[in-house]
Image (tube, rainbow, N blue to C red):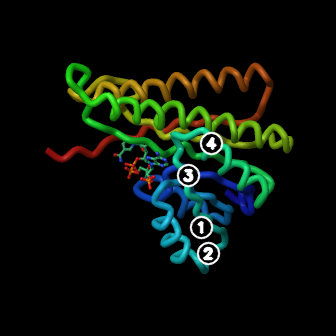
């Protein structure tokens, strides 16, 4: 991890769960981390607890399903730090939304955040890497076992968004190879811990 000391990471959905844990781990490894979320005050709390660590955690309010807010967030990162070296696409929502009588707004929210938001952040991060000649950048997509199999009744829209993450990761990998880019794309295979 030494080579990442002082470099800049953007973590989406850093206000709770896995995103918060990733942000903290990166800060402890000396990175400058910008955590995006709507509940920005939660990231600010984390920032206070990381005062004596090597890296820095900066909280930025951003709805990652909104193009304007994403563009503003990446502009802020550019102004403040020059640009992004690592993007962790973590923010996602999961609703139990039946395709027969599920809530249309919930279905749209999942697609807007889990797919479109991820795509827009990826584009902004790649633009930032390319304009600064950063060829060792890294995009990390948080996926799920549901990105590979349909397992739970009622969760097929969420499952579809995670299948999309699988396809988008492989698609971007191929595009980067074609461009002879050394920028990496990684996808996680997180498993759900379900309690019955
Ligand atoms: N936990 C698991 O067992 C598990 C299993 C498989 C995959 N995953 C994947 O791992 C990732 C993290 O999961 P988690 O369980 O840690 O999630 P979580 O605790 O529910 O946290 C979700 C994060 O996403 C953010 N978020 C939600 N809507 C947002 C929006 N519109 N704009 C910006 N941020 C938004 C939330 O922040 P705000 O609400 O403050 O905006 C929060 O920080 C997700 O991609 C999930 O699909 C998790």
Q: Is residue 38 left or right of residue 1?
A: left
**Element under disc 1:** helix
Crowdedness near tag 2: few (<14), some (14–19) or many (≥20) residues, C-alpha within 10 Å: some
* Mark earlier in primary sequence (4, 1): 1
Q: Mark 2 = which residue?
A: 53
Q: Which mark is residue 62?
A: 3
Q: Do residues under tags 3 and 4 come within 8 Å of each other at their CB atoms?
A: no
* Mark earlier in primary sequence (3, 2): 2
**Residue drawn at x 50%, y 56% as measured from the top left:** 14
From the viewer's perspective, is the residue at label 4 or at label 1 nearer?
4
Q: Is residue 159 left or right of residue 50?
A: left
**Whole-number angstrom distance, CA of label 3 to CA of label 2:** 25 Å
**Residue drawn at x 46%, y 66% as measured from the top left:** 42
Q: Nearer the viewer, residue 155 or 173?
A: 155
Q: Is residue 196 left or right of residue 118?
A: left
Q: Which mark is residue 28?
A: 1
**Whole-number angstrom distance, CA of label 1 to CA of label 2:** 6 Å
**Element under disc 4:** helix
Quadrant of the rendered image containing residue 140: top right
Q: Residue furthest bottom?
A: 52
Q: Mark 4 = which residue?
A: 68
* Mark earlier in primary sequence (4, 2): 2
Q: Say if 41 sits above or below 123 in the image.
A: below
Q: Do residues under tags 1 and 2 come within 8 Å of each other at their CB atoms?
A: yes
**Residue drawn at x 52%, y 48% as measured from the top left:** 63
**Whole-number angstrom distance, CA of label 4 to CA of label 2:** 32 Å
* Mark earlier in primary sequence (1, 3): 1
**Whole-number angstrom distance, CA of label 1 to CA of label 3:** 23 Å
Q: Do residues under tags 4 and 2 come within 8 Å of each other at their CB atoms?
A: no
């Amino acid at each position: 991890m030494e080579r990442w000391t002082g470099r800049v990471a953007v973590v989406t959905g850093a206000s709770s769960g896995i995103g918060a844990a990733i942000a903290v781990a990166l800060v402890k490894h000396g990175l400058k981390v910008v955590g995006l979320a709507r509940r920005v005050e939660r990231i600010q709390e984390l920032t206070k607890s990381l005062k004596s660590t090597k890296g820095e955690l900066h909280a930025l309010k951003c709805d990652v399903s909104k193009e304007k807010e994403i563009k503003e967030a990446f502009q802020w990162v550019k102004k403040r730090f020059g640009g992004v070296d690592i993007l962790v696409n973590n923010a996602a929502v999961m609703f139990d939304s039946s395709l027969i009588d599920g809530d249309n707004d919930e279905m749209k929210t999942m697609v807007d955040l889990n797919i479109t938001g991820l795509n827009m952040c990826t584009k902004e991060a790649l633009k930032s890497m390319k304009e600064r000649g950063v060829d060792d950048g890294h995009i990390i997509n948080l996926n799920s076992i549901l990105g590979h199999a349909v397992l739970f009744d009622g969760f097929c829209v969420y499952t579809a968004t995670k299948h999309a993450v699988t396809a988008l990761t492989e698609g971007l990998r191929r595009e980067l190879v074609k461009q002879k880019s050394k920028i990496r794309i990684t996808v996680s295979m997180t498993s759900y811990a379900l309690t019955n």
